[in-house]
Amino acid sequence: MNTVMFSGSTVTPSKILCVGKNYAAHIEEMNSVPAEDMVVFMKPNTSIGDTLYAERGETLHYEGEICLLMQDDKVAGIGFGLDLTKRATQSKLKEAGLPWERSKAFEGSALFSEFVPAPDNLDNLLLELWVDGELRQRGGVDLMLYRPDTILSELRSFVPFADNDIVMTGTPSGVGTVRVGERFEGRVFNGDEELLRVDWLAV
């Protein structure tokens, strides 16, 4: 089983629950429309990787996300994650009305920073993604269509959380293609306080 780090310890998520279409600007940039209900898809433990690949059978796109690590049915940790997507495959699946797993749940499609203890109030969380020193994505809870409390309530309505499960809360606008040699740096803030940062070199 693949692992992530939480406050210096190794933990094993059993699953990753992902929220789609959670930022209005991202919906617009994807030429999509808001869904009637919260969009949810899953990634298995095997999707957790530590290498940022630019290609896995086709070009990959990056999506930076604020991530929540669950323990005792509540948010224990905060991290930064990259949801890597086979966009061409996803587009074909969407057009056919089929599930997204082939484009989202492949091996190495989920990269995570170390998780740090969550603040008591999640409303001021904000992410930034920099690529080669250029700010590509910036967004936080204040821009989410579904905030963390709503996300967790919706997820609990149909699936139980196991300890160390991860929730990926959706991506703001600015997604794009991963290119070999680019350096990605993700940051998560609580208001003005930087909670964590992580970097990957695309190969």
Image: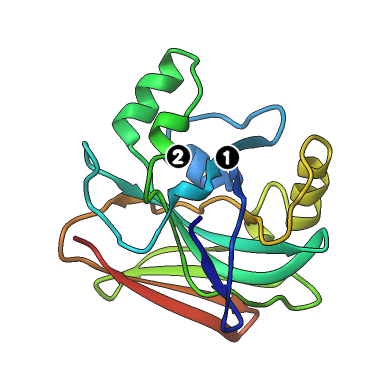
Residue 3 rendering spot, x and y as whole percentages: 51, 64
Tell me the amino acid under the disc marked 2. Answer: Ala
Q: Position of residue 159 (x, y in %)?
A: 77, 39
Labelled pair 2, 1 in contact (Cβ < 8 Å): yes
Residue 74's place in the image compared with 176, above or below, is below
Q: Amino acid at mark 1?
A: Met
Q: In the rendered view, how is the structure colored?
A: rainbow
Report the residue marked by disc 2: 105
Could you say which quadrant of the image residue 93 lies in?
top left
Q: Is residue 119 left or right of residue 143?
A: right
Q: Quadrant of residue 66?
A: bottom right
Identified at 42% across, 41% down, the residue is 29
Task: Classify residue 79 as left or right of residue 84.
Answer: right
Residue at 24% x, 42% y is 56
| Label 2 secondary element | loop
User: Which residue is rendered at x = 82% and y = 43% of the image?
Assistant: 156
Q: Label 1 crowding class (10 Å Cα cut-off): few <14, some 14-19, many 20+? A: some
Mark sitting on residue 42:
1
Task: Depth check: give the residue in front, 26 or 43.
Answer: 43
- Image quadrant holding the C terminus, namely bottom left
- Residue 17 x, y percent position in the rendering: 62, 46
Who is closer to the viewer here, 72 or 2? 2
Residue extending furthest toward the left:
181
Numbered tag placed on residue 108 in the rendering: none
Crowding at mark 2 (Cα within 10 Å: few <14, some 14-19, many 20+): many
Left/right of residue 202 with respect to residue 37 in the rendered view: left
Examine the rendered structure and indicate whether residue 21 appears above or below residue 1: above
**Residue 50, image x and y in percent?**
36, 64
Work out whether mark 2 precedes mark 1 in sequence or the reverse, and give the earlier one: 1
* Residue pictured at 65% horizontal, 79% vertical: 190
Question: Under tag 1, what secondary structure?
Answer: strand
